[in-house]
C-alpha cells in the first residue's frame, strides 16, 4: 500500500503459509466479493483493500511466484505495485459476470469476441458391416452443416441494402465508461461489437448469415478400424466466422455385429460343431471367415472346447503389421438317441478304452504329464503352434 509498509500476502488473504491452492482461491474470492468497487462505489478504503487482495492473489495464486515469495519475500516478486493480471479473474467469471470484472478480458486485450472465430466441430455416427474393416475403404456420407448464405454472402443483410453505422459507439464497436476509479472500454451493447446495425436482414437466412446445407464427404476408413474408434477429418466442420478457420468433422464408427462371430483386437472368434465320430477320427470342415471359406483340419482325438486357429484370417492390425487369426472353438455334439446297433458299438468302445485316467497327483506348481493335461488349450493344428489359451474368453462370449 502507498506510504505504508507492505503487508504479508498470506495475512492479506487471511490464510496460513501451508494453505492449499483451493484455500487461497476461496479466500480471495471472499475478499473480492466483499470489496470490489461495484459493491462499494466511492469507498476508497474498499478500493485499496480490493487492490491489495488482488495483488496478493496474483502472487500466491501462481505456483512459481508463490515459491519465489516464500523464499525471498516481496523482493522475490518485484515488491509493491504489481500490475493487475487479467488471468487471475478467469477462475471467477461466474462471480463477476455482468459486473466491472466481466470487462477485464476486453480491458487487457483478451477475449475479443468479434474477431475471426473458428467454426464448430461436427460429430457423425457411421455404421459399417462386420467384415468391412478387413481392408482400406472409402465411405461417402452426407453431413449437415451451417454454411454462408448464398443470398447475402454471409453478411446477414438483404441484397441491395447496407447496414447503418452504430450511433452508440460511432462504428468503433467499443464504448467507454467509468466505474469508480477506472475508465474502461467494453463491447458496444448497441451493435454487439460489429460497429454496424442491420436494419434490413436477409430474408433467406433471417439475418443469420448462414443456412443449413448437406454436403457429401468421402471418409477413408483404415483397415483394422474397430467399433467405437473415431476419425478426425480436418477442415470439414462448419465454416469459421469473420474469416476464421473451419472446424473439424469427427466420425465415430459403429460396427454391425455378425451372427456367430465376435472380434477381439485383430482376431475373429467363432465356433464349429462336429460329431462324436469326427472328434474321435479327425476330419476337415469348411469355415466361413471374413476372407471367404477356408478348410479347417480337425485332428483325431480333438477334445470338446479345443480352440483351433486359422492364421492370418483375422483383421489387419490397425497400428502394426500383419493380420490376426480366425479362432474356432470346437463343440462336440453327443447324440441323444441311438439305435440298437449304435448303442452296441458305443458300449463295445467303452469297454475297450476303459474309464478315463485319474486326475494327476502332481505337486502344486508342477504340470501333470503330457497325457494328463487338459485338452481344452490351443491345439497345434492348421500350421500354428500352441499359444495362450482363449477358452475363458470364449466361455464369456458364447455362454
Image (tube, rainbow, N blue to C red):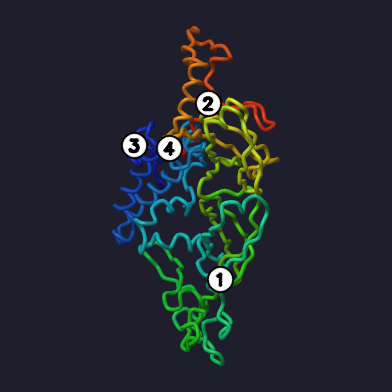
Q: Are marks 3 and 1 in contact (CB under 8 Å)?
A: no
Task: Give the image quarter of residue 286.
Answer: top right
Mark found first going from the N terminus, 3 or 1: 3
CA–CA distance in space, label 4 to label 1: 55 Å
Answer above or below: position of 55 versus 399: below
Question: Looking at this view, is 36 or 397 the one in front?
Answer: 397
Residue at point 44%, 50% (across, down): 88
Residue tagged 3: 15
Q: Residues within 10 Å of mark 3 (few under 14, many from 20)?
A: some
Q: Earlier in the sequence, mark 4 or mark 1?
A: 1
Mark 4 Cα shell of 10 Å, populated few (<14), some (14-19), many (≥20): few
Near-viewer residue (371 or 356): 356
Q: Which residue is mark 4?
A: 399
- Between the residue at mark 3 and the residue at mark 1, the CA separation in whole angstroms equals 46 Å
The answer to which of marks 4 and 3 sits earlier in the sequence is 3
Element class at badge 2: loop
Rounded to the nearest whole Å, what is the CA distance between mark 2 and mark 1? 63 Å
Bin the neighbour count of mark 1 within 10 Å (Cα to Cα): few under 14, some 14-19, many 20 and up. Answer: some
Q: Which of the marked residues, 2 or 3, is nearer the chain's N terminus?
A: 3
Label 3 vs label 1, nearer the camera: 1
Mark 2 vs 4, N-terminal side:
2
Residue at (57%, 15%) from the top-left corner? 371
Identify residue for label 1. Answer: 241
Instruction: Indicate which label's residue lies in the foreground, 2 or 1.
Output: 2
User: In what quadrant of the picture does the C terminus appear?
Assistant: top left
Q: Residues within 10 Å of mark 2 (few under 14, many from 20)?
A: some
In the picture, the disc for residue 376 is 2
Direction front: furthest residue: 341
Amino acid at each position: 500500500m502507498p506510504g505504508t509498509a507492505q503487508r504479508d500476502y498470506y495475512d492479506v488473504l487471511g490464510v496460513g503459509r501451508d494453505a492449499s491452492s483451493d484455500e487461497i482461491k476461496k479466500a480471495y474470492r471472499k475478499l473480492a466479493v466483499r470489496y470490489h468497487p461495484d459493491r462499494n462505489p466511492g469507498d476508497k478504503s474498499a478500493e485499496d483493500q480490493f487492490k491489495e487482495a488482488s495483488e496478493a492473489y496474483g502472487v500466491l495464486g501462481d505456483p512459481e511466484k508463490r515459491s519465489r515469495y516464500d523464499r525471498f519475500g516481496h523482493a522475490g516478486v518485484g515488491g509493491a505495485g504489481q500490475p493487475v493480471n487479467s488471468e487471475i479473474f478467469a477462475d471467477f467469471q461466474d462471480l463477476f459476470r455482468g459486473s466491472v470484472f466481466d470487462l477485464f478480458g476486453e480491458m487487457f486485450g483478451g477475449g475479443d469476441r468479434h474477431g475471426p472465430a473458428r467454426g464448430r466441430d461436427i460429430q457423425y455416427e457411421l455404421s459399417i458391416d462386420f467384415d468391412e474393416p478387413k481392408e482400406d475403404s472409402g465411405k461417402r456420407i452426407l453431413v449437415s452443416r451451417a454454411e454462408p448464405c448464398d443470398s447475402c454472402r454471409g453478411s446477414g443483410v438483404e441484397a441491395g441494402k447496407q447496414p447503418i453505422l452504430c450511433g452508440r459507439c460511432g462504428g468503433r464497436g467499443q464504448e467507454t465508461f467509468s466505474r469508480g476509479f477506472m475508465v474502461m472500454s467494453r463491447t458496444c451493447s448497441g451493435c454487439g461489437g460489429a460497429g454496424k446495425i442491420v436494419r434490413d436482414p436477409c430474408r433467406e437466412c433471417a439475418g443469420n448469415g448462414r443456412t443449413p446445407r448437406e454436403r457429401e464427404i468421402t471418409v477413408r476408413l483404415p483397415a483394422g478400424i474397430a467399433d467405437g474408434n473415431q476419425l478426425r477429418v480436418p477442415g470439414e466442420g462448419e465454416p469459421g466466422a469473420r474469416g476464421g478457420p473451419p472446424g473439424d468433422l469427427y466420425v465415430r464408427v459403429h460396427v454391425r455385429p455378425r451372427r456367430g462371430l465376435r472380434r477381439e483386437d485383430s482376431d475373429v472368434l467363432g465356433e464349429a460343431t462336429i460329431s462324436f465320430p469326427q472328434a474321435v477320427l479327425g476330419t476337415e470342415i469348411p469355415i466361413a471367415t471374413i476372407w471367404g471359406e477356408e478348410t479347417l483340419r480337425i485332428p483325431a482325438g480333438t477334445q470338446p472346447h479345443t480352440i483351433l486357429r486359422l492364421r492370418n484370417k483375422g483383421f489387419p492390425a490397425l497400428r502394426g503389421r500383419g493380420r490376426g487369426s480366425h479362432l474356432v472353438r470346437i463343440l462336440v455334439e453327443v447324440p441323444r438317441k441311438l439305435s440298437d446297433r449304435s448303442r452296441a458299438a458305443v458300449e463295445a468302445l467303452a469297454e475297450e478304452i476303459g474309464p478315463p485316467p485319474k486326475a494327476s497327483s502332481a505337486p502344486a506348481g508342477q504340470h501333470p504329464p503330457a497325457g494328463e493335461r487338459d485338452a481344452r488349450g490351443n491345439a497345434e493344428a492348421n500350421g500354428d503352434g500352441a499359444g495362450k489359451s482363449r477358452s475363458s474368453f470364449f466361455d464369456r462370449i458364447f455362454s
